[in-house]
Image (cartoon, rainbow, N blue to C red):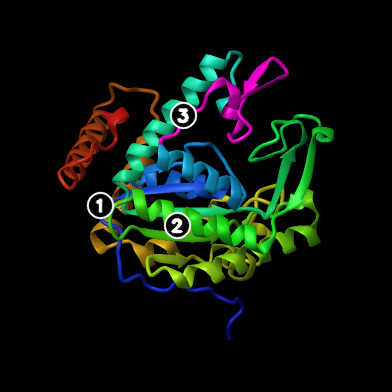
Amino acid sequence: MKFRTEVHIEDSARKIGVEDKIFSIGSCFSTELSDLLKMGQLQTLNNPFGTVFNPFSINTAIKKLHDSEFYTEDDLISFNNEVISLDHHTSFNSRFAHQTLEKINTSIEAGNLFLQETNWVVITYGTSFIHEFIPRKKLVANCHKIPGKHFEKLLLTQQELEDSINETIDNLNDICKENVQILFTVSPVRHTKDGIVENNLSKSKLTSAIHEVLPRFSNCHYLPIFEIMMDDLRDYRFYKDDMIHPNSQAVTYIFEKFGNSFFSDETMDFVEENFSITKALEHKTDDENNPKYLEFCENLKGRIALQQTKVKHSIFEDKR
């Protein structure tokens, strides 16, 4: 007798290798996945524009990265004693224009270089809603807590969603390594501030647009992460206290299903050992001169050194 509906991720013919580079962009759930990839000591770059939720704004970011198009002061606005880019997350804000521009343009340069070497791209869409900044008639990625009277909330049309996704794929296929694999998913985080009905409409439009565009490209695939959270993990015990965001247990479960389908056996072993090492590194002691603790540390250094022999890129750099 079954008591849950398990959602399977189809086994991938292409596998993520230990030296592959993985670029991710999108909602806060893309950061959750990227953090686990980093913990596994794989080469990753996540959200060079900060957290971005809708396909139009994600496409804008990808175009800027593709073209290595730097921002200027004309692209910024001032609000509440900060200089802001409406295309970026609040983490790029600062008190002075040159500081904001330095953060933004440094990230664009790094993102452009990383994309040129990228083997895998993971895109996580969060919503079909977008806001227009009325003073500039500009569709924006983030409202930065500017009063709502300055914005008009819009629902992207199906054509706008499909055009954004299609252009994103074209730009990625142009800049990334040959035969780059692009994985699309819809974030399981519910945007309850939009309203429950509105959130469901928003998510359904995303899913529909993705499935309309992807069959045109042999290197693009859909990951049913939204479906895993909604159906496989249909229980509030898998949510954080806000009852909106998946908790660590849910994220780990989804990551394991993703790894089982997309990691090579070598990568799986590499990541699992690095997870174990990371957990061991969290061990604290009241007596750092205890012989047993010193032996534990030496053993850990040996494990890290052995893992380093398996890859060319540096791992656990801040733990040596």
**Mark 3 or 1 closer to N-term?**
1
Q: Residue at x 53, y 48 (%)?
A: 59
Q: Pinpoint residue 72: horizontal percent, then vertical percent.
A: 53, 23
Could you say whether the residue bearing mark 2 is in a helix, strand or loop? helix
**Mark 2 or 1 closer to N-term?**
1
Q: How many marks?
A: 3
Vertical side of 60 occupied by 190: above or below = below
Residue 125, picture quadrant: bottom right
**Quick check: marks 2 and 1 in contact, CB under 8 Å?**
no
Instruction: Give the residues in magenta.
Output: 68-91
Q: Quadrant of the N terminus?
A: bottom right
Q: Pinpoint residue 280: horizontal percent, then vertical percent.
A: 35, 40
Q: Residue at x 45, y 48 (%)?
A: 24
Look at discs 3 and 1 and give the one toward the viewer: 3
Residue closest to the eye, 182 or 314: 182
Q: Is residue 50 magenta?
A: no
Q: Which residue is mark 2?
A: 169
Residue closest to the eye, 6 or 282: 6
Could you say whether the residue bearing mark 3 is in a helix, strand or loop? loop
**Quick check: marks 2 and 3 in contact, CB under 8 Å?**
no
Q: Which residue is mark 1?
A: 18
Label 3, residues with CA under 10 Å away: few <14, some 14-19, many ≥20: some
The amino acid type of the residue labelled 2 equals Ile
Q: Residue at x 79, y 42 (%)?
A: 152
Residue closest to the eye, 285 or 252: 252
Q: Residue at x 57, y 59 (%)?
A: 163
The amino acid type of the residue labelled 3 equals Phe
The amino acid type of the residue labelled 1 equals Val
Q: Residue 250: in sight, yes or no?
A: no
Label 1, residues with CA under 10 Å away: few <14, some 14-19, many ≥20: many
Label for residue 70? Answer: 3
Residue 225, picture quadrant: bottom right
